[in-house]
Image (cartoon, helix red, strand yellow):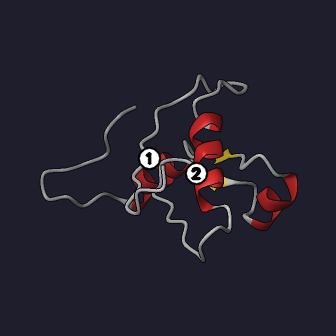
Amino acid sequence: MKRISTKNGFVTALEVCARRKLCFKISTGSTEFDKLLGGGIESQSITEVFGEFRTGKTQLSHTLCATCQLPNGSYRGGKVIFIDTESTL
């Protein structure tokens, strides 16, 4: 992937538009939940999941970790980082 950056850190709207075209949606494993999210979790972004104890946050995170690494169509699979700040693993 080509890095979009300049010496002063600013990019043009055309460069931002070109980068946004590379984004795609990652399925949560639930068709209905994907619909609520507008197609799934957006790639190339940071997504924070929060909520009450035992509501499925860790399960969702584990599912997304597996799903985003699977090849799908023209996508060859990717890398993921899982940061657990509450030691739930």
Q: Find out whether the residues at labels 2 and 1 contact each other: C-beta distance under 8 Å.
A: yes
Viewer-closest of 69 and 55:
55
The disc labelled 1 sits on which kind of residue?
Answer: Phe
Identify the disc placed on residue 42: none
Q: Can residue 84 be seen from the camera position used here?
A: yes
Q: Can residue 24 be seen from the camera position used here?
A: no
Q: Residue furthest right?
A: 32
Rendering coords of residue 29 (x, y %): 77, 46
Q: Quadrant of the N terminus?
A: top left
Q: Residue at x 30, y 57 (%)?
A: 11
Q: Residue furthest left?
A: 7
Q: Residue at x 68, y 68 (%)?
A: 55
Report helix, strand or loop for mark 2.
helix
Q: Seen in the image, is 37 located left or right of residue 48?
A: right
Rendering coords of residue 20 (x, y %): 52, 51
The quadrant in which residue 85 appears is bottom left
Figure check: 10 above or below 4 = below
Badge 2: how crowded within 10 Å, few (<14), some, or many (20+)? some
Residue at which label 2 appears? 61
Q: Seen in the image, is 18 located left or right of residue 29?
A: left
Residue at which label 1 appears? 82
Mark 2 or mark 1: whose residue is earlier in sequence = 2
Report helix, strand or loop for mark 1.
loop
Viewer-closest of 69 and 52:
52
Viewer-closest of 42 and 15:
42
